[in-house]
Image (cartoon, helix red, strand yellow):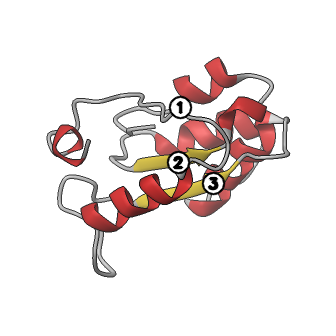
Amino acid sequence: MAKRLQPLILVLALVVAPAGFGKTALVAELAWHLAPGDEPPAHLPDGILFYRCTDQDDVNLAFQHIAVSYGEDLLPTPALAAQRALAGRRALLLLDGVEAVDDLAALAKIGDQCTV
């Protein structure tokens, strides 16, 4: 998977397996492989952002996390703030437990050149 992310071709990737299989650990290892130090990799200059959606069905909480992480004001809506925050950015968004989110389609659409 790391090689597929290098040219930033991939827009959406899902890691699906039963609970306890190690999905989060696998994705954390991928993130560490892509950015082993304190600096983001050259092809992801805006970094790697992790958010755990588990036990939170309101997609707006994920939008808020993204917006606040990039210093955006949450008005007029968290979704628009997240879109502004990601506009023109190249980042990897690691969203853990998205099966709990009430509007996964909206969450998947917010990235511009970001890999979700």
Out of 96 and 75, give the one closest to the viewer.
96
The number of numbered discs placed on residues in the rendered structure image is 3
Q: Earlier in the sequence, mark 3 or mark 1?
A: 1
- The residue carrying mark 3 is 51
**Alpha-carbon distance for marks 3 and 1?**
17 Å
The residue at the point 28 percent across, 59 percent down is: 45
**Alpha-carbon distance for marks 1 and 2?**
7 Å
Left or right: where does residue 49 sit relative to residue 7?
right
The residue at the point 67 percent across, 36 percent down is: 98
- The residue carrying mark 2 is 23
Percent across and percent down for residue 77 are 78, 36
- The residue carrying mark 1 is 16
Q: Earlier in the sequence, mark 3 or mark 2?
A: 2
Disc 3 marks a residue whose amino acid type is Tyr
**Alpha-carbon distance for marks 3 and 2?**
14 Å
Disc 2 marks a residue whose amino acid type is Lys
